[in-house]
Amino acid sequence: MQELHAHLNGSISEETMRKLLSRRNGPTADTKMMFDKGQTATLEDCFNMFKLIHQVTVDTESVYMVACDVIREFAADNVKYLELRSTPREVVATGMTKEKYIEAILQAMKDCEKENLDIIVKLILAIDRRNGVKVAMETVNLAAKYRESSAGRVVGIDLSGDPKVGDGCDFIPAFQAAKAKGLKLALHLAEVPAVEETKEILQIVPDRIGHGTCLHTEAGGSQDLVDLVTHHQIPIELCLTSNVIGQTVPHFDNHQFKFWYAKNHPCVICTDDKGVFNTTLSNEYSIASRTFSLDERTLYQLSLQSIQYIFADDSVKADLKSRWKTWEAERFPITT
Ligand code: IMP
Ligand code: ZN
């Protein structure tokens, strides 16, 4: 499998959280940092949870530890290619600058490479909608700088944060600057109904869309949005548990996966925040399988097709495809 939509601070496991809470003052060990299975919440609850988590990842040691653990956990879940995304954060009290934050993650990626975990990891830097345009442009410049100095480990830019805050169109110049610097764009779009904002951002044709919950008319979107996304064949990163717990989708049956999959549109199953939403990528594939009656071969095809949409270069894609094909020949031998 490949995981293309995983926020670092949302992906912290219970075990890692325990280690973090024992390290410093802040939220106590019994503070809830994840939702229970089957629980529902509001988007506001989710964003409050991120604020709590940010109180325990305030220094480079914590960020490094979190990144190492998250990479190892995805590898243990049989993820062979991972794109982590994270918002560069400065914490004056501990001396953590945005540069040090990014370098801690890159160091974790490099150190995990030495552990022979059988996983390729790339990094996407996130623009938080709450932080405004100036910060967004800074993030783009940081991404360009670290792409050069990290042997291509930094691959792109994300737009995330509370979708009800601010106007995503304000960031269009930052997205254009990122594109001009050769960075890929994975943007959270239409998590809540926002037809005009989404239409305008789609004009720059992002490389992938996060969630796209409210693109189609039945979910508060419009046919224009569907036509644009379909015309440009923009892959959509779909995170089932995240959307159901956050209640942007009432039930798995109503998840937008159904709409886009039925159109044969590029769909990528992802976790979003495996820690906060208490899930794994395998679990997300199982939910998709149970909810939409997809057999093992169909899941395999979905996973194989997702390789086309990764932000790594063509040689990585070719290697992954060849591994997938080898596995296919073993798992589904042709019988005569
Ligand atoms: P970080 O960027 O590694 O700190 O990961 C946590 C951040 O990811 C949150 O503060 C949000 O900005 C963002 N995030 C995580 N999940 C979502 C989501 O479902 N929608 C929008 N933003 C999200
Ligand atoms: Zn997300």
Image (cartoon, helix red, strand yellow):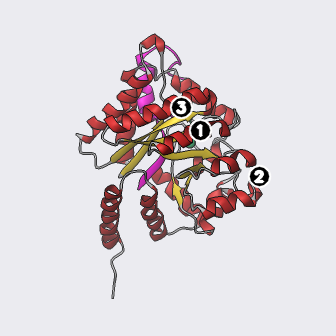
Q: Are marks 2 and 3 in contact (CB under 8 Å)?
A: no
Q: Is residue 34 above or below residue 267?
A: above
Which quadrant would the N terminus be assigned to in this image? bottom left
Question: Is residue 42 visible from the viewing direction of this image?
Answer: no
Q: Earlier in the sequence, mark 2 or mark 3?
A: 3
The picture places residue 158, in percent across and down from the top left corner, at 53, 41
Which numbered dot is residue 137? 3
* Magenta-highlighted residues: 1-30
Q: Is residue 257 above or below residue 16?
A: below
- Mark 3, Cα crowd under 10 Å, few <14 / some 14-19 / many 20+, is some
**SS for tag 2?**
loop
Which quadrant would the C terminus be assigned to in this image? bottom left
Q: Earlier in the sequence, mark 3 or mark 1?
A: 3
Q: Which residue is mark 1?
A: 173
5 with respect to 193 (left or right): left
Determine if the magenta segment contains residue 7: yes
Judge depth for marks 2 and 1 and give the one in front.
Answer: 1
**Residue at the far bottom in the pictured view:** 336
The picture places residue 63, in percent across and down from the top left corner, at 40, 27
Q: Is residue 319 above or below residue 271?
A: below
Q: Which residue is mark 2?
A: 220
* Amino acid marked by disc 1: Pro
Identify which residue, 275 or 325, lies in the foreground: 325
Identify which residue, 15 or 112, lies in the foreground: 112
* Amino acid marked by disc 3: Met
* Mark 1 CB lies closer than 8 A to ligand 1: no
- Tell me what residue is drawn at x 46 percent, y 32 percent: 141
Q: Are marks 3 and 1 in contact (CB under 8 Å)?
A: yes
**SS for tag 3?**
helix
* Amino acid marked by disc 2: Gly
